[in-house]
Each structure stands twice: as structure tokens, then as C-alpha cells.
Image (cartoon, rainbow, N blue to C red):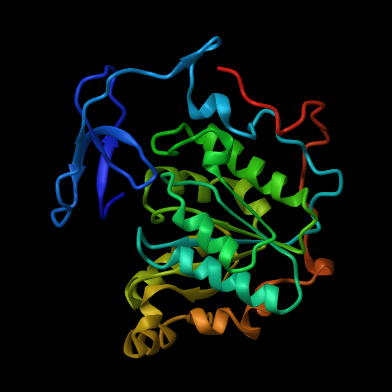
Amino acid sequence: APDQFEAEVPADLGPTRLVAAGGLAANVVSQHAEMLEATTLEPIGLVVDHAGVVNLRRCAPYSVAGAPTPRHPGRVPTIAVLGTSMNSGKTTTVGSIVRGLSRAGLTVAAGKVTGTGAGGDPGVFADSGASRVLDFTDFGHPSTYLLPHEEIAGLTRAIRDELLLGSPDVVVLEVADGLFQRETAQLVADPAFGSMVDAVVFAAGEALGAVAGLERLRSLGLPVMAVSGLLTASPLATEEARGHLPVPVWGPEQLAGPKAAALVPPVSALPARPESARIHAASSAEPVAV
């Protein structure tokens, strides 16, 4: 997280640090200059049971390998929210879209596919009216930092497919951090991600970032429909962005209202998506063994 810590899980039980609100313990590699020192922890051991060490991967309610392929996929619009960086307004944007579409009478499912585990973001989605909320922690990952791209891609599809099982009218997905962050950069450049996404809303902190981000996403063939984010807190920054963007710039209040409906393409306009014909026999709710 560029505004907080870069940290890695140690190989031993020596003193370490509490580096995230979700309870992640790791050794700090670097940190933002304005961050206070992370709380020091002294691990005393690992929790075990008859099967070995108890961890999130074992106890998660879903698994990527066990995620079923929906029997009628491809007809539910998927909106992705991306941004310039951490704290650019992505989560607020997702919450506003969910609220606006829910007010329009649609059933909206929401997920966060990458990031570091914390309860705040899923809570925003649920409080905004999402019928179902999932994130990467539900699939056994306390963080997606440094995961191989193949795992990130599989996790993204698994979260989307699980959300589809609830028969929503729309799915909204947040991708953490900015377009240049390693995992995000690889994901958005993957054609499989493009085939999954029907609309993109880009969150930016300032006009220049909005213009550069839109150009980058459109160069990858992604359908950017609107810009939002922290820049919309400033009327001057909003006007600067509008003067250089070919898409609308909408703040949270607008996305939480009728504007949100413009992000949902008619089902008849959606291209067919190549989907796996495989239907997993195992229930996705079964615990995952390591």
C-alpha cells in the first residue's frame, strides 16, 4: 500500500509488526513517510488442530478451485472500478454505484478482487445495498500482494462467478491500488479480464491522473464509461477533468442517483463471453485443505 506499508510475512516467529487493520502481521520493508511506526508484535506460537496449522486458506468458506461456473453466464453486466492509486476514491465509487443501481430497483452484487484484508471496504458495499458481498479473504487470501498473475486471474473470475450465483442484475468489482501496481497492471492487461468487464469507472485524485488513466485503459481495450473519485470533491479539479475527458465526470452523489443506470449496458448489447463449460461437482462452500 503506497500510502502505508510494504511488508512481507517472515519465515520465523521472531518479533514482527502489525501492518494492516485486518490483523496482518509482517516485517515492514518500507513505509510512507507520514506513517507512524507499526505496532511491534511478539508471536508466541501458531494455532494448530488435528490437521495442522490453522490458517485462512484452510478455513475460508470458498476456494478458487471449487468455484462453480454459472450455468447461465455472460448475461449479467459487470462493472469494474479502477483507480490511479490507493485512496483515490475507488471504494466510495463502488458504494455509490451500488446505491444508485439499488435505488433504480436492480439487485447488485459487489466484490473486491485484490488488496489487503480489512473489514471496511466490504462493509461499505453491504451498507450501500449490495445483495451479496465477497472479497479475496473469502477465498483464503489475507492479501493478494505478490500473488502470481495466474492466481489473481483465477481469483477474480471465482469471485465474479460466485456473485453471479445469487442471480444479481449487475455485478460491481473493485480492483485495489493503481494501474501501475504490479498485480493490477497484470490483471487489466489480461484479455480475459477485458472479456469479463462490460463497463469501467475510473477513480482519480486529480485531472491529469484521470486523463492518463483513461488513455491507459482505453489502450487496453477496456470500456471506460465515467470518471469519479477524490477529484470530484473539488469543483475546480472536476471542471479541469471535464475539459480534457471524453467521458462524464460524476461525483458520489450523482453515481448514487439516476446517473448509475447509464453504466449498465442493455443485455442485448453485450457480446457473448467465452466461458468454461466445466461445472465443478464440489461445493464452493467446502473448506479448503492445505
Is residue 215 in view? no
Q: Residue at x 48, y 81 (%)?
A: 251
Residue 239 position by quadrant: bottom left
The answer to whether 33 appears left or right of 259 in the picture is left
The image shows residue 173 at horizontal and vertical percentages of 58, 56
The image shows residue 170 at horizontal and vertical percentages of 72, 63
Taking depth in this image into account, of 184 and 142 the one nearest to the observer is: 142
Residue 96 position by quadrant: bottom right
The image shows residue 158 at horizontal and vertical percentages of 66, 40
Query: Please, is residue 138 above or below residue 172 in the view?
Result: above
The image shows residue 1 at horizontal and vertical percentages of 31, 49
The answer to whether 265 appears left or right of 121 in the picture is right
The answer to whether 71 appears left or right of 224 in the picture is right
The image quadrant where one finds the C terminus is top right
Query: Please, is residue 104 above or below residue 22 in the view?
Result: below
Q: Residue at x 57, y 79 (%)?
A: 255
The answer to whether 238 appears left or right of 282 in the picture is left
